[in-house]
Structures are given as structure tokens and as C-alpha cells.
Image (cartoon, helix red, strand yellow):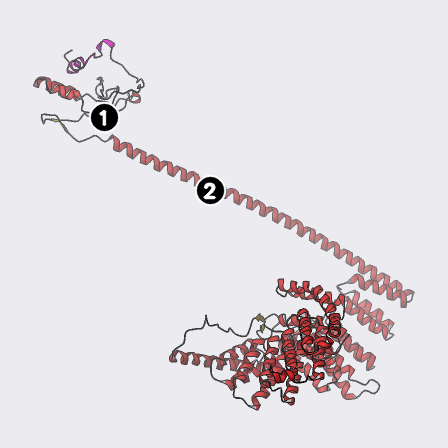
Amino acid sequence: MNAKPIAEELPQQDSSMEVEQDNAAPGAWEITKGSRHKPTDDDQPEELSAEQQDEKTLEALNEMTSIMEELENDKTRYDLHVRLIELLQQVPMDDELDRARAQMHEIYPLSESMWLDWINDTKEKEDSEEREEKLLWLYEEANRDYFSIPIWNSFVDRVLEKFDNKFDDPEKVQAAREDLSRAARATEHHISQGQQIWSKYIEFETKVLKPFDSEESMQQELDPKQVERVKQLYRNRLDVLHTSAEETFNNFSTFNTTFDNANYEENMLQANKLYAKTQKAIEVRDQYELQLKQTNNALSTFYEYIEYERQTNDRFSLNNTRNLYERAVTIYCTDVGLWDNYITFLLERARFPVILEAISRRAVRNCPWSGALWAHYARSLEANNKDKAEVLEIFTKASAVEVLLTSLEDLVNLYLAKCDYLRRQVDWSNPREEDIVDLRLAFEEAFVYLHEKHPKTPDPYFRIERYYAFVENTLLDSEEKAREIWETRVIKKLGRSAEAWLAYIDFERSCGHLDKCQTLYKRAIVRNLDDPQRFTMAWLSFAREAGNLDMLQDTLVKVKSKENAIVHQWQEQAAEMEVASKAEEQKLIKQKKQKAQHRLKNKAKQKQKRDQEENDSQASKSEETTKEESQAKEPEDTVREDDDGFKMPAPVKRKASASNDSGITSPVAKRTRIDDLEEEQSSEDRGEASSSNRGRVLGRGGRGRGRGRGRLGLGFSAKKNTKEEPKEAGPSLPSESKPKSQDDFRAMLLGKK
């Protein structure tokens, strides 16, 4: 397995995401694409007038002043750094913009887009040696923050632009070759995008063989070393896992046809062996690459892919696993667990101090609140043989991160690492007093931070206290100091912890003080321990292993008494729980009853409301009906006239008696032929007929009962009613008195018959 690519320090992975945070707090960063929105031609804002532009600039200046004052008080405000850079990009203040970017870069990694903005702004400045040095520094720093294919592409384009096809200048060719080779090595293990850089590099090396497409160039003798160099580059590329392996193989075939056709078969046979293995490995990994696309680079998919590489463990697994971690940390840059797993993987498979230092440095820049990552960083510096002052400076920087101190676990991890480092710096065969003092001060400093930041929540595992007691007792031969640590630092704060008491007793037993062990057991047994069963079992084991008969019997008595007390306590707790359970059941039953009564009341109210609405509706309909009937029963005040112009009073509608109302309907007066017959009579007859007509009521067809003075009224309709009328109650005319003709009817009506 070729370990050379791993041994080199590779910059971090592709970063198309930006991390934004507030006060560097865990979970407060937001991942966003790019540092700022770059408008296209379609969404360019309208041009502002000079007055509007001045007003906008003034607002930006006021806001910048406020942000600068806040950053003076707290330089860890990530969001303020980003906002300040955005504002400075709106005003012509290039020097201030560079300072703001550099100030942010000292604390946090810049996103890919922010680095590209900085690089492009520098390119626009006047050409000078100072500008070239700054560009080189920007590319170096950008690639330390994140592994970005776009940034490497920009670097390669800059190298080729600076080279300017000066193939006749060997020094420039060599300088360009070194830069392009470095870019190709840094990106070669990116399985899908590394080909972009390598293609530009191999194109450059091929042009060195034939820089110009001219007859003179074609007739020029080829350099055998350069031909072999290009062939070796192709073979190396075919031996690296990349998705464009088929394209590389075909290009190599074309190169051999053009520049080394005599050895075509031999060259392609060697290349085919490499290509076949690479292509087979690519086919197996294609499914995982597809899953990453389908899940939008989900972290769980990355872990599944990494687990596959761990189990496969072929010659491609090491580099591809690192590549996967780089791709993952680019997206999930604030995931402490991911960085920790990445560093642990390198410790297991590629423990190179240079790489570990670079990865750990990037980890703490992305997650400054993690004590575990700061510990990794300090250990990597120690492994890289850095000075003691430089390593201790790492712990000083970490302890200045306020967010880290608020986490008990991170604080403990940080100071355990510091105490570890200082203990390893002591030559225990001949210790120096200065080193001993530094070690003790580190433990005391840890206690100060723990008491200040977490006064009510001590470390339940008392890791730093146990460690300090071990150092004092075992390494410094200070038994009393160790006992003091156990009493004041552990038991005083964790008096209910069975684990703390047992650890203290183990310390005394290791010192050979069995009587003190028995005393500690008696002190602890009266406490309300969190795990009394484990404690009593440990005490019985100690009495059997190290005690005499009296000690064992005393222990049995104490343990039995404690067990009875525990059983009694459990019984009381069970009874209380039962009472509480019954009370809760009664409460639930009462609530159910109340809910049922409430539902019944609501239903009754709803029914009452519906009944009221129905009654109101019926009353309304009844009122309307009564009104219509009263309007229909109003007497007509209109007066009719006969043909001679004499006014005839309208028939008076009389109320029927109670005994006759049921079968009588009020007729409507109509003008019939009888009125025409009456005009032929004499004035006497007319007067008599008029008096007779006052009691007559004409119906709309059929018969009807008269309503006045018991007289009989007959109705006559000019239109024959074909429908049989129902029989009405009341007296009827005798058959012989019924008119036979119109004349008879008229005579009967006038009283002459």
C-alpha cells in the first residue's frame, strides 16, 4: 500500500457552505450557501441616484461603527464579523476590508465564497510583487480552512496565467510544474471532482512535449524523459480511485498512439491491469455515491459509506475513507462527533503527526467549544515535538472560550488533557520542582474553574479528583495530601455516591489501612446512598477477605439493619405510590364524571336552543298567516255601478253563527246575468230587488250558506263547475222549490213565485 499520499498534508475538503454562529455557541451556527447573495443579470437592482447612494453609504458607515465597538468587547461574535465584511464590500474601503477579513480569519475559518471574494479582490489590484505574495498567502490559508475544488481551480488558473505559455523558459516550466503537481496531489483522492485539476496538469505536461502545433514542432525530436514522465502520470492516475477512470484510460491510449506508438501494446497492457482493478472498485462504490446524491449528502449515509470502507479495507479504502471524512466535515463542520471520529480514524490508520496537527487545528477552529477537540490538538502538538510553551498556549486559548467553560464535560476533558501533558513532562526518575509545581497548579486551576462554573453540579465520576489523588499518593508519596483530596474534594461534594465511597475505601486499602476502611464503611452505611445494594455487597466481600470474626459479624449486623431499613423504605414508598395511584384514579374518575355532566348540560342547552328556535319559527309563521287572513277578511269599500249609472252598495259580509261556521265559506260577489235582467223591471221591482240583494251573497260557483238573519243565499256561476262540490251541512231547498229555468229563478228571486 502506498502511504505517500496520506503522509502529505492535504488541505480541507470542498466547501460550498458557510457557517454562521452567534457567540460561537454549540448549535448556534447556521449552514448557508455562500457568504452573500450574488445577483444575476435578471435580478440586478435598479441604479440608485447619487443622493440615495450617499444615504446608503452613510447608513453602512454608522452600522460599521456600532459593529466595531461590539467586536472590541467580544471578538468571538461570528455573525458580527460576517456583517462587517458585507458592509465594507459596499463602500470603497479596501484596507479596512482586508483588516476585517484577517481579523475574522484569526478566530474562525472563512467560507469558500468568502475566500474567493478576497482572492478576486486582490487580483484586481495593481500588479506588483507584493500582490503576488499576498495571493500566494491567500491560497495557502484558504486551502488550510477547507478542501475546496473551486479554490484549487482558481489557483491552477492563476499558475497557468502567470506561466503564459513560456515553454521556452525552463525555469518557468519547472516552477509551473511544481505548483500544478502540488494541486493535483492535493485533490487526486476526490473521487468525483479531482479529475478537474489533474486534467489541467496532464495537459500542461503534454504541451511541454509539443508546445506548438507547427511543422517545426512536429519535426522536433521528443524528449524521452518527458514522454516517460507523462506516461507515469497516466499510470499513477489509473492507480487512484476516481470516477473518470475510463476517460483517463482512453486519453492514455491516444497519447501512446501520438507519442509512443512503437510501444503501444506494452504500455496499454500495463495500464489495463491498473484500470481493471480501479474500475472494479469504482463499480462497487457507485451505489454509495448514488445514495449520497439521493439523500442530499446525509450524515448517516456518509457513516454507512465509511463503515463499508472500514470493512472492505482494500488498497483504496484508506485514501477514500479520508476523502469521505473531508467531504463530510465540509458540510457538517460543527459536528464535534464527526471531527472526533475523523481524528480517531487517523490515529488508528495513519498516525502522522503533521496530518493530525493540521486536522486538529481545523477542528478547533470550527468547534471551539469542544474540550475533546482541544485535547486532540494539544496531543498532536506534543507528538510533533512542539515546545512546552506552545502546547500550554493551546490550553490557555481553550480556557478563554466562555462557551467551553459552561459545559462540565468539555471542561473536564480539557483539564484532564492538560494534567496528562504536564505529568508526561516530569522526569520521574529525577523530577524537577518546577515541573511538580506546574502539575499541581494545573489540578488546582481545574478545581477553581469547576467550583466557579459548576458549583452545584460536580463531576459525578470525580475524574480530576481521583487523578490528583493518584498523583499525590503514588507519584509524589504524599498520602495525607491524597486523603485530604478524597475528604474535601470528593466525599464532601458526593456524599450520596456509593461509587465515591468505594473509591475512597479502595485508596485506603491500597495504603494498607484496613481499620480505616471499616470506619469508612460504617460512615457511609448511614448515608442515603444512591446504590446501597452494591455498597453492602462490597462491604461483605471486604469483611470476608480482610476481616476477623468480630469484623465479619459486625458487618453482618450493620448490613442486615441497612437491608431492613431499605425494605421498610421501599414498603413505605410502595404504599405512598399506591395511595397516590388511587388518588390519581379517583381524580381521573371525578374528571370523567365532570366531563360527562358537562356534556349532558351542553346537550340540554343545545336541545333547549333548538326548541326555542323552532317555537320562534312557528310563532313567526303563525303571525304571518294571521296577518294574511286578516288582510283577506277586510271588507271591500269599493262601490259598484249598474249600467244606468246608479251606484250599488257592495254586499255586506256578515259573521256566521257559531253553529254554521264550520261548513260555510265566504262567497265573493260577482256580476252575473241576473244584474242584466234586473234592469228590465219596474222601479218598484228594482227597489224591491235592491232590498233583496242586500242579504244575498253570490258564490264563486256551487252553493253556500247565507250568513244574514237565517235567510238562504244561493250562488250562481256563469262558468259551469265540472268538479263535484262536497256536500255542506245545513238546510237545503225543497225539490219543488228549485228553479227549473232562468225565469223561474228570477221570479223566485224577486218574490213573485
Q: Is residue 479 visible?
A: no
- Residue 580 lies, with reference to residue 670, above or below; the image says below
Element assignment for label 1: loop
Residue 383 drawn in magenta: no
Where on the picture, by quarter, is residue 650? top left
Q: CA distance from mark 1 to mark 2?
A: 49 Å
Residue 307: x and y in percent read 73, 65
Q: Residue furthest bottom?
A: 129
Using the rendered image of the protein, determine whether residue 583 is visible from the camera's viewpoint.
Answer: yes
- Which image quadrant: the N terminus? bottom right
Marks 1/2 in contact by CB < 8 Å: the verdict is: no
Question: Vertically, is 173 above or below 316?
Answer: below
- Residue that sits furthest to the left in the current view: 683
**145 and 248: which is toward the camera:** 248
Magenta region includes residue 744: yes
Q: Which residue is mark 2?
A: 606
Of badges 1 and 2, the one in the foreground is 1
Find numbered disc 2 in the image and state the secondary structure of the residue it sits on. Answer: helix
Q: Residue at x 61, y 49 (%)?
A: 587
Q: Nearer the viewer, residue 249 or 582?
A: 249
Residue 668 shows which numbered tag? 1
Comes first in the chain, label 1 or label 2: 2
Considering every residue shown, the one lying at the far right of the view is: 549
Q: Position of residue 354 (x, y in %)?
A: 72, 81
Work out whether 158 lies above or below 585.
Answer: below
Query: Which stretch appears magenta?
Result: 730-753
Q: Amino acid at mark 1?
A: Val
703 or 53, which lies in front?
53
Instruction: Pinpoint residue 163: horizontal percent, then vertical percent.
Output: 60, 85
Tag 2: amino acid: Gln
